[in-house]
């Protein structure tokens, strides 16, 4: 990922860069194929959402939405054993995945030498509570994993605080 860091030292990232970061994270956890899809198409009907807030040169959040079935796959991959029937393990896996994606996005957004604080992941089974539409500072990407599992990843930067350089 070092080649990407030099590309994006700005207050927003392109959807292509966020897709690349997210694809690397998901492929690292569960070896899979990964294709871009419309973010609107990638909203699972039921599932989990993990959100990590950040504060540094800007303020915002990174979120990951996955279907219940893919949360089961993540949990099993991370635990190293079949834990599909354990919702708490699914929640932990989605939270950890959101944390990994957020950390990777922060490295691209602000570089590795800038101080950025991230929150513990907030995980819910309610995937409806997420920014959408034409919101300033919102970048969304959709991923199709193994031609079957839809995943949505988003970055929301408060553009006003990013302009002010809020510590």
Image (tube, rainbow, N blue to C red):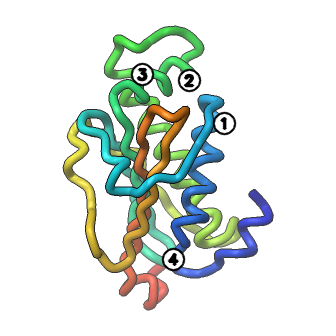
Per the image, label 3 sits on a secondary structure element best described as helix
Q: x, y percentage for residue 163?
A: 45, 89
At a point 25% along the width and 44% down the height, the residue shown is 127
Marks 1 and 3 sit apart, C-alpha to C-alpha, by 16 Å
Q: Are marks 2 and 4 in contact (CB under 8 Å)?
A: no
Identity of the residue furthest to the front in this view:
147
For residue 93, side relative to residue 86 (left or right): right
Label 4, secondary structure: give it: loop
First reached walking from the N terminus: tag 3 or tag 2: 3
Mark 3 residue crowding within 10 angstroms, few (<14) / some (14–19) / many (20+): many
Tag of residue 102 = none
Viewer-side label of 3, 2: 3
Residue nearer the viewer, 112 or 159: 159
Q: Is residue 60 above or below residue 37?
A: below
Where residue 30 appears, as percent x and y from the top left, is 60, 29
Inter-mark Cα distance, 3 to 4: 32 Å
Looking at marks 1 and 3 on the same chain, the residue that comes earlier in the sequence is marked by: 1
Which residue is denoted by mark 3 in the rendering? 72
CB contact under 8 Å: marks 3 and 4: no
Residue that numbered label 4 is attached to: 12
Q: What secondary structure is marked by label 1?
A: helix
Placement of the N terminus among the 4 image quadrants = bottom right
Residue with the mark numbered 1 = 28
């Amino acid at each position: 990922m070092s080649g990407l860091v030099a590309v994006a030292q700005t207050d927003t990232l392109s959807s292509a860069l966020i897709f690349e970061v997210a694809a690397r994270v998901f492929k690292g956890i569960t070896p899979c194929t990964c294709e871009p899809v419309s973010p609107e198409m990638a909203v699972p009907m039921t599932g989990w959402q993990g959100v990590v807030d950040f504060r540094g040169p800007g303020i915002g959040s990174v979120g990951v939405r996955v279907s219940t079935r893919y949360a089961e796959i993540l949990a099993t991959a991370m635990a190293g054993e079949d834990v599909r029937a354990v919702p708490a393990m699914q929640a932990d896996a989605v939270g950890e995945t959101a944390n990994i994606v957020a950390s990777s996005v922060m490295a691209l957004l602000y570089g590795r030498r800038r101080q950025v604080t991230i929150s513990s992941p907030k995980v819910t089974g309610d995937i409806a509570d997420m920014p959408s539409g034409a919101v300033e500072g919102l970048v969304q990407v959709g991923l199709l994993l193994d031609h079957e599992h839809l995943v949505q990843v988003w970055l929301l930067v408060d553009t006003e605080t990013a302009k002010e350089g809020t510590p």
